[in-house]
Image (spheres, rainbow, N blue to C red):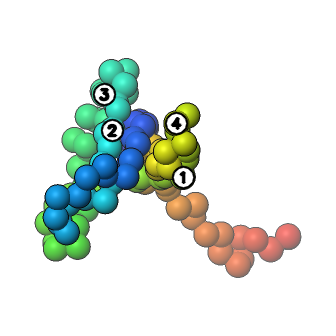
Amino acid sequence: MSDFTAKFSLFPAKERKNEKSPDSTGSIEISASELPALIAYLQDPANMQDDWQGNPAVKIRLAGWNATSKNGLQYVNGKMSPPMQQAPAASAVESLPF
């Protein structure tokens, strides 16, 4: 699996024109040095799975932390990366001390 990271920030929307307007807006920044790994990840068929509608999709993990800007504005700061791999569970027989 190709490892990559990208950073994102979401700020409260300054103006909502209607009820369908987003509550937050922001951007994702992908470093030029991370682009080859991101592209490799997106193109790897092993990373393809069906979305909730059954369409082929690639899943990317987002992790966010609440933060406060220098001006006192609350926002979410985070990163994008491949999904975390689950550690295989050890069977009961493998965990016996003998």
Mark 1: which amino acid?
A: Asn
For marks 1 and 3 on the same chain, the one whose residue lies earlier in the sequence: 3
Residue contact at pointers 3 and 4, CB within 8 angstroms: no
In the picture of the structure, the residue carrying the numbered disc 4 is 71
Q: Give me the residue at 52% from left, 36% from top.
A: 71
Residue 92 shows in this picture: yes
Front tag of 4 and 2: 4
Across and down, in percent, residue 63 comes to 47, 52
For marks 3 and 4 on the same chain, the one whose residue lies earlier in the sequence: 3
Q: CA distance from mark 4 to mark 1?
A: 15 Å
Quick one: quadrant of the N terminus? top left
Report helix, strand or loop for mark 3: helix
- Drawn side of residue 95 relative to residue 35, left or right: right
Mark 3 neighbour class, 10 Å CA radius: few under 14, some 14 to 19, many 20 or more: some
- Drawn side of residue 59 relative to residue 78, left or right: left
Of residues 5 and 47, the one nearer the viewer is 5
Quick one: quadrant of the C terminus? bottom right
In the picture of the structure, the residue carrying the numbered disc 3 is 35
For marks 1 and 2 on the same chain, the one whose residue lies earlier in the sequence: 2
Q: CA distance from mark 3 to mark 4?
A: 32 Å
Report helix, strand or loop for mark 2: strand
Mark 2 neighbour class, 10 Å CA radius: few under 14, some 14 to 19, many 20 or more: few
In the picture of the structure, the residue carrying the numbered disc 1 is 66
